[in-house]
Amino acid sequence: EELLVRDKPLKGKKVLITAGPTRETLDPVRYITNRSSGKMGYSLAKQAYLLGAEVTLISGPTTLRPFPGVKRINIESAREMHDIVLKTYENQDIVIKAAAVADYRPKNSAEHKIKKQPGEMVLELERNPDILAELGQNKGSRILIGFAAETNNVLAYAAEKAKRKNLDFIVANDLTQPGAGFGVDTNIISLVFPDGQIKSFPQMDKEEAAREILLVAAKHLNKTKE
Ligand code: CTP
Ligand code: CA
């Protein structure tokens, strides 16, 4: 029994993970997106499952397949992700937002293909909802974890986000480091806590990084449930 708990620290727990980019439609043939591959989120889903959790993966468009046993829900836009995440959020124990959510969407999405015109074109964008910040306002006893992929002032920006969004911690990575971030199989992460504490890791495989993140999350869950 004791061994089982040590092997599967997330047994009986519900874990919600978001992954991948979002797509913001401009017209029937065009969209705005970002360089997220979804690898970190899919690794988190697999490792959470292997640690015993019941896993829901809410995913933007990627070429990846979810690990067998992981329940995936596909979405495209930030607003679709917002609606599904809020619907699923209620009975979760741990929520990890690894998705690269578009901050803006085209103000108008055209019904028909936009035709080019002479001269410049100005694209108007409007803000998408900040899903994680919304979850943070209704956190309850859930463990809430974000990601911050930055190119400068990495730890300072990450700490600010962890505080502002009411997170248990945020996973920071520096996109300028070759072994970290979008499109690669490894990551160099630091866990940044709202009180300023930082736990840094060496370069790891994304699967390994995912496991480390989940083990810290499991520890926090036990602390808040006591
Ligand atoms: N996030 C979210 N909804 C958004 C934007 C971001 O849920 N509309 C989440 C991301 O999934 C991530 C965290 O917030 O876990 C941080 O995302 P990031 O883009 O780094 O932070 P922003 O607050 O959007 O700040 P900025 O892009 O200006 O750095
Ligand atoms: Ca953003």
Image: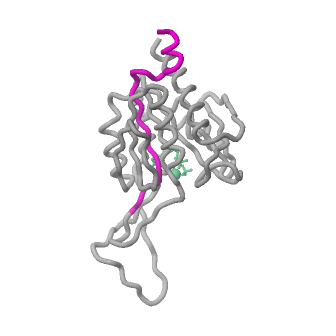
In the image, the segment drawn in magenta is 1-24
Residue reaching furthest to the bottom: 118
Measured as percent of width and height from the top left, residue 148 is found at 58, 44
Residue reaching furthest to the left: 111
Q: Is residue 197 left or right of residue 23?
A: right
Q: Is 86 inside the magenta-drawn segment? A: no
- Residue 87 image-quadrant placement: top left
Residue reaching furthest to the front: 68
Q: Nearer the viewer, residue 146 or 72?
A: 72
Residue reaching furthest to the top: 1
Which residue is at 47% across, 27% downward?
143
Q: Considering only vertical position in the picture, is 107 above or below 36?
A: below
Measured as percent of width and height from the top left, residue 62 is found at 45, 55
Which residue is at 41% across, 29% downward?
139
Measured as percent of width and height from the top left, residue 209 is found at 61, 37
Q: Considering only vertical position in the picture, is 194 above or below 68?
A: above
Q: Considering only vertical position in the picture, is 149 above or below 218?
A: below
Measured as percent of width and height from the top left, residue 142 is found at 43, 26
Q: Nearer the viewer, residue 66 or 91?
A: 66
